[in-house]
Image: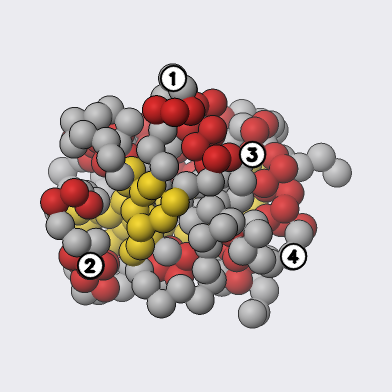
């Protein structure tokens, strides 16, 4: 695999990180809208993304009516109304506030995941906004199920305990036993198909995963390490997530 240097932006705190990431994402959207009729974006749902999405909501000069949104993972086994569902989280924090052209929510209980696969494959993805998990996962591609050569765009996975514990630590669930054990996720190749990736990673809990992403081998044991193979990936860190030299 060809390895590229990630474009790393270091910020003193989460708020500044969110401002800088949102400014760069907005600039990328504006640039693309100058040359194409629509921008297709994939969003992550997690507390780590909250500041960036809040800043993006202020970018009212963007023609959001020409932006189509997807999201990258969803739990299996939660009711459609559950606040922990990622589609509901993104709706509360972003989608319902923006005049988007179209929002495609992952609703795996309503049909086969191949439907979402077809929507994603209909046209190229322009921008992905994502984070990195404490175990190095991208979306719900935990180390045991991550596959850099996955032939699928969307798949059902079993969640690693470290991934499920992160949801408790993020205060999304009260107890580990409340976190679903299975989910639907966009695969690594699907995420990497985006022309530009903006990876937003604040917080001390992510420092070790960031270190492995930047300095460890490129391996499914740390799925985020594959970001070093993407030619246009920007990584946003704050003082807490920045690896110590």
Q: What's the distance in space between the residues labelled 4 and 2, CA to CA? A: 32 Å
Identify the residue shown where x is 41% and y is 77%.
Answer: 151
**Viewer-nearest residue: 14 or 179:** 179
Disc on res. 206: 3
1 or 4: tag closer to the N-terminus: 1
Q: Residue at x 34, y 53 (%)?
A: 184
- The answer to whether residue 192 of the structure is visible from this angle is no
Picture disc at residue 174: 1
* Element class at badge 3: helix
Mark 1 or 3, nearer chain start: 1
Which circle marks residue 217 in the picture?
A: 4
Numbered disc in front, either 3 or 2: 2
Report, in whole angstroms, how far the alpha carbon at label 2 lies from the one at label 1: 32 Å
Dot 4 lies on which element? loop
Whether residue 219 is visible = yes
- Image coordinates of residue 198 in percent, x first then y, are 49, 54
């Amino acid at each position: 695999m060809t390895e590229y240097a990630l474009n790393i932006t270091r910020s003193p705190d989460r708020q500044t990180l969110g401002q800088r990431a949102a400014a760069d994402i907005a600039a990328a959207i504006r640039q693309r809208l100058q040359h194409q009729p629509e921008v297709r974006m994939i969003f992550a749902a997690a507390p780590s993304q909250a500041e960036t999405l809040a800043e993006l909501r202020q970018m009212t000069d963007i023609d959001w009516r020409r932006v189509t949104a997807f999201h990258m993972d969803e739990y299996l086994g939660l009711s459609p109304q559950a606040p922990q569902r990622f589609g509901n989280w993104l709706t509360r924090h972003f989608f319902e506030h923006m005049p988007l052209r179209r929002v495609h929510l992952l609703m795996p209980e309503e049909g086969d995941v191949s439907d979402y696969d077809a929507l994603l494959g209909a046209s190229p993805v322009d921008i992905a906004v994502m984070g990195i998990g404490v175990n190095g996962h991208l979306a719900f591609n935990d180390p045991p199920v991550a596959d850099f050569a996955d032939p699928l765009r969307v798949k059902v996975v079993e969640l690693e305990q470290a991934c499920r514990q992160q949801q408790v630590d993020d205060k999304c669930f009260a107890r580990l036993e409340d976190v679903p054990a299975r989910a639907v996720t966009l695969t690594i190749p699907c995420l990497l198909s985006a022309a530009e990736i903006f990876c937003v990673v604040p917080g001390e809990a992510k420092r070790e995963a960031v270190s492995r992403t930047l300095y460890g081998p490129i391996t499914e044991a740390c799925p985020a390490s594959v970001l070093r193979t993407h030619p246009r990936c920007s990584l946003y860190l704050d003082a807490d997530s920045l690896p110590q030299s």
